[in-house]
Image (spheres, coloured by chain):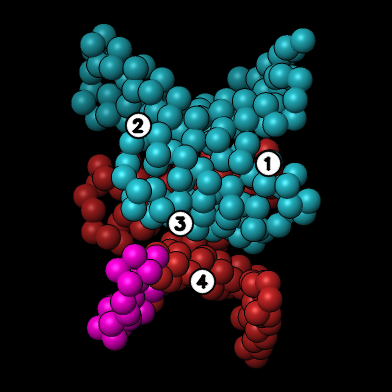
Chain colours: A red, B cyan
Amino acid sequence: MPRSSFSSSLSSPKVNFAIDMGHPLLNHTVDGFLKIGTVAASRVAVEETYHCIKKGSVSSNGLEKSLKKMCKEGAYWGAVAGVYVGMEYGTEKVRGTRDWKNAMLGGAATGALVSAACSSNGEKIVIDAIAGGAIATAAEFINYLT
Amino acid sequence: MPRSSFSSSLSSPKVNFAIDMGHPLLNHTVDGFLKIGTVAASRVAVEETYHCIKKGSVSSNGLEKSLKKMCKEGAYWGAVAGVYVGMEYGTEKVRGTRDWKNAMLGGAATGALVSAACSSNGEKIVIDAIAGGAIATAAEFINYLT
């Protein structure tokens, strides 16, 4: 049975979602979608706020556009993150180990999938898969460093 | 005294550098530069190999171009990663805690620095700082998920 909880505080933003979909793979994917979608939507919100401050005025038309952009970017980043988290989880289960190669394979699969979904041609998909693998590997390494 | 060691094996590529520069901040920065630079150079190598296989021929001219591209991309990614790792380390020391806000602040500082170094104008620097912070936060969250 789907169970969901949400917690946040105003003083210090804590991102803490827990939605149980009944399967770890689904949980990971939904978690990735929500968290990264939130980050992307926040980015757009901050960026649009900066534009408003710079212009010195807030129009209802501009606000509507900003909200639409938040939803669009949040959904896009969230979808990519969800695919990646699911792919990495699957790779880990298939390979049976946890290392940077999971991130590389998961990133490559995500790059290929997202590229294919955006109706790219064959060559572009391979290039995007290589780039996805490299970016995921880099993010994994950065994380071990810090 | 600078001390360096290098270990790798052919059967399974292990990325393991250790260069002691005498200060943790410098060590982190150099480590980030080398690791992420290696990832970026590998990405170019794989991409160029794919192009060669597709074309079915290897020319010495193309090989030289590929090597130059590997060095350029490796240095660029490495520099960005080095700045980010240094910034996150510095933020951690100043704030005294380890959480995702370090990644956000480090990413924002890196975005602003890299954007300023590429001689962008004021507005572009703010936008790049916001994007940098968002990407770093997303990478940090992804890492907790997987």
- Looking at the rendered structure, which numbered label has been put on residue B130? 3
The residue singled out by tag 4 in the image is A38
Instruction: For residue A72, say whether it is visible.
Output: no
Which region of the structure is painted magenta?
Answer: A50-70
Give the answer, above or below, for where B43 lies relative to A72: above
User: Label 3 to label 4, Cα distance in Å?
Assistant: 14 Å
User: Rounded to the nearest whole Å, what is the CA distance between mark 2 and mark 3?
Assistant: 30 Å
Give the vertical position of B66 relative to B46 (above or below). Answer: above
Q: What predominant SS class does the magenta segment belong to?
A: helix
Q: Residue at x 68, y 76 (%)?
A: A11
Name which residue lies at 46% across and 46% down. B111
Q: Which amino acid does label 4 sit on?
A: Thr
Alpha carbon distance from label 2 to label 1: 35 Å
Indicate which label's residue lies in the foreground, 2 or 3. Answer: 3
Q: In which quarter of the image is residue B15?
A: top right
Amino acid type, label 1: Gly
Dot 2 or dot 3: first in sequence order is 2
Residue B122 vs residue A135: left or right?
A: left
